[in-house]
Amino acid sequence: MSKKKSFSDKLRFWDNDPEKTKKEDTHAKHWAREWLDALVWAAIAAIILRTFFFGAYRIPTPSMEKTLLTGDFLIVTKLAYGPRSPMTLSVPFTDIYVPGVELPWFRFPGYTDIERDDIVVFNYPIDRGPVSMKTNYIKRAVGMPGDRLRIEDKVLFVNDEPSVEYSTMMQNYRVQVRERIRLSPTKVRDAGASIVQSGNGTHILNMSEEIAEKVSSWGEVDSVEPFVLPDDFDTFGRRNFNFSDGFTNHDNMSEFTVPYKGQEITLTEENWNIYQDILQRYERNDVEKNGDNFIINGEETNQYTIELDYYFTMGDNRDDSEDSRYWGFVPDDHVIGKASLIYFSWDGERWLPRFERIFNMIH
């Protein structure tokens, strides 16, 4: 005798309908595939944008203050000078790459050339490893290929003319205060300066020219003048950079020419510090040296033709920036792009955003 099926039994039967289950599984697979396809295409688009169009970078140090502040987040335009094709086999968005594999690469045309005083992002030249995997640096390009540069008492001369100084540039000043008067650290900080050193009524402050003029008007201050390192003060030797071997300190540097493609040079014992990294590190020549005698790629010769254009860069915080004055020139193939926009800024001391800096253009 058969039992009459209850409503709940019929419902369970309906729920276990194989045809419906198959349709639901098919729908779920289509949904998952659509999302996977969207994620893959989004990743591909992000890789293309990052490789050829734009890069996002954060300022970690005060070397460009007050033009760029620690905690500024920047958009860098790679299209400006021309993006580079991939140079290594690497995992996107990471520092992982296949050692020993360097791809033939080229630079796409850009819409502008590097101009003097552009703020440029580049790979740190004296790092080891493939060019594109070196640390990213940001500085101001103060010397173009072929420029003659020298520094006298902190002043940079380009082709015998004093370089442009921006209102945001910082450097060290010597501040002399009146006898038995104390200079308030809080007052200094509120003015936008910082105390580097103090003693016997003399203070070394890091500040812009505008702030220096304000400090000079304080009643407790007798005098304010740029702090220039004495000639015998060595800021280079202990760092062991090839380029700086021929100079004493970064406040005074004798004249030199920024190398350029096609430049013919004569190598000597005296100028070897200028060209050593260019020949051996950047243009990858085998060089043996014995005094003024050189063997380049097996040929005994003191003549060499430069293969790349080079740039001389400096930080806007001139006394708190390790830049070309220390380690030398930036090769053209190390250039990444032009800093264009601050899209966010974070004040790490106050733990607050700097809203007034967001979406500021970079000059």
Image (spheres, rainbow, N blue to C red):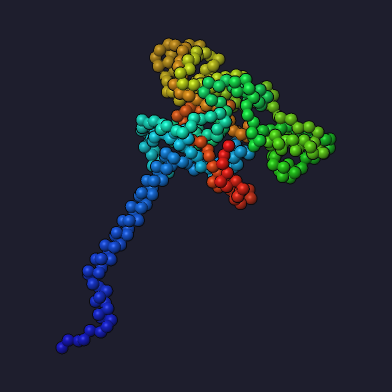
Instruction: Report whether residue 126 is seen.
Output: no
- The quadrant of the rendering that contains the C terminus is top right
The residue drawn where x is 55% and y is 44% is: 342
Please indicate, yes or no, whether residue 25 appears anywhere in the rendered image. yes
Identity of the residue drawn at 38% across and 39% down: 90
| Left or right position of 11 against 348 | left
Q: Residue furthest left?
A: 1
Left or right of 291, for residue 177: right
Instruction: Please provide percent x and percent y for residue 271.
Output: 54, 16
Q: Which residue does the image show at 57% across and 23% down from the upper left?
A: 244
Taking depth in this image into account, of 193 and 281 the one nearest to the observer is 193
Q: Position of residue 177 (x, y in %)?
A: 80, 35
Residue at (48% x, 35% y) in the render: 80
**Quadrant in the rendering for residue 262:** top left
> Where's residue 116, x and y in %?
56, 28
- When the figure is inspected, residue 40 is found, relative to residue 224, above or below; the finding is below
Residue placed furthest toward the bottom:
1
Q: Is 147 positioned to the left or the right of 210 in the image? A: left
Farthest front residue in view: 111
Q: Quadrant of the N terminus?
A: bottom left
